[in-house]
Image (cartoon, rainbow, N blue to C red):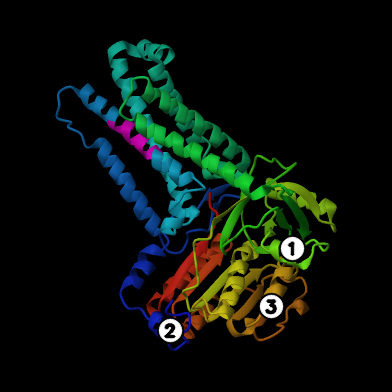
Amino acid sequence: MTGMNSNANQQRYFQLNRSSWWKVKKHLLYAPLWSKRHNREFKLSSAVNMGTLPSRWHALLLIVYLSMNVAYTLVLDYSRENQYSVVAELRGRSGVLAVCNMIALVILAGRNNPLIGWLQISFDTYNLLHRWMGRIVVLESLVHTSCWAYVQHADTGFSGVWDKLMHDPFCSYGMVGTAAFVFILLTSPSPVRHAFYETFLNVHIILAAVAIAGVWIHCDIPDLPQKPYIRAVAFLWVADRVFRLVRLAWCNYSTKGWTTASIEAMPGDACRVTMHLPKKLHVKPGSHAYLRFEKLNFWESHPFSIAWVAHRPLLPDELPSNEKKLLLERQTTDISFVIHAQTGLTRRLFDAAKLESPRALKLKAAFEGPYAGHHSLDSYGHAVLFAGSSGITHQIPYVQHLIQGFNDGTIATKKVLLVWIIRDVEHLEWVRPWMDEILRMQGRRDILTIKLFVTKPKNPKEIHSPSATVQMLPGRPNINLLLQSEVREQIGAMCVTVCGPGALQDSIREAVREVQEDGVVDFIEESFTW
């Protein structure tokens, strides 16, 4: 609030570091695990993706949590003469911890996780924690089952173990839960997830339901004290899916009909998708949504960044003016995306749109969202937005919002730099209608500078700068020099955001860390790693 009506000199107070917090950001919060690599994926080939490394902060959290689980499981009284009693206690502890961790496991996986908004932590971070929490649950389940089998074998031999598994429901359903967890682990490595995402997701959901049901019955038969925990797990898992269905119905259905999608094939293996919702929907900058398309595996949903939002009033020409005024409040919303064709659904979508080109492909579709949108840049005097390829879709809503807020005097931002890195000039077509609208906005020249870097232009003569505030340059940007230049002209606190390929995100993260000592520079990255 203090910075809204202040000029650049008045915001200088917020520009300078007033504590040693910058050291924490540089060496822990923004630091990769080792030197530079964090979101750049390890690939054995174009088809074999080995995933990414956690950040230093994420690694610390995971190590602490894993250490706590190891300590709670293994710190036992090993001096007892009866070794089977020690193993029995280990069985009990590992089982209790597995069920307790399932609560966090389900919460971290939920799209409707309220902690995302409350703690301002991205779904990407929660997804990372979910994957590691799942590995912990599987290991504890295996320890629990192995300890039971060890004691049972000592008492009755292999025949007794087999007899229990076949004829004792308590043991049978416990084994069902453990087996489901093990199959989840075997089908979840990064190469499998990336190569067969749709199959992985469907199998994952089915096995999760089997695991929860197996553990529920396992705890219910002897009325174990852990029964309330597994009930909570089941409730949270079902509730998230119910909320998704409710959100789907609320967003896409009205008396005027169901959501439809217009899909246009664009240069560079991309398509521009506009979802025509039958009602008005408020969307914050930085949001994403899950999309489904009729005739393209409607049960599958994929997340995409929201690029543009337009509201259309329902004003039939034949209505008198007084009724038109009342109907101004009744609007529908068009929400647009740019989807780069990769494999699976995105490739099928692009191929279908290309067959209809130059006309737009019309399909019934479903919009689930918006999600995220919890990062606000309104309090920063200076915003630097980086985008690589289709990552521009994440940044355009922020640019529009910041210019409008600057004109209205409702934000502190006085300077915005948008840096977009593309392969060829033809990729400008992806966002041309929205960018044209931004360039026509009042006050745009007073706050916004755009720098377009074209790395592999087909025709170098196409590279020219229309004006001082819209510059088109060949090659790749020197991110360190560019950011250092912005810091020298910094207005108030600065925020640097990025959405794009992992290598670009890592380079910008490194550059932000280098300028931490020079002033208040925060860093936000948007990525969908899974």
Q: Earlier in the sequence, mark 2 or mark 3?
A: 2
Q: Are there few (<14), some (14-19), or many (20+) residues within 10 Å of tag 3?
A: some
Mark 2 vs mark 1: give the one in front.
1
Which residue is painted at 41% across and 81% down in the image? 15
Q: Is residue 47 visible?
A: no
Which residue position holds label 2?
A: 11
- Which percent across, then down, holds residue 37? 47, 61
Quarter containing the N terminus: bottom left
- Helix, strand or loop under label 2: loop
Point out which mark residue 323 bears. Answer: 1
Q: Are there few (<14), some (14-19), or many (20+) residues within 10 Å of tag 1?
A: few
Point out which mark residue 439 bears. Answer: 3
In depth, the one of 156 and 134 nearer the eye is 134
Q: Main secondary structure of the magenta part?
A: helix
| Cα–Cα span, label 2 and label 3 | 26 Å
Residue 95: which quarter of the image? top left
Which residue is painted at 40% across and 80% down in the image? 14
Mark 3 vs mark 1: give the one in front.
1
| Image height of 416 relative to 164, above or below | below
What kind of residue is marked 2?
Gln
| Cα–Cα span, label 2 and label 1 | 47 Å
- Which percent across, then down, holds residue 466? 72, 83
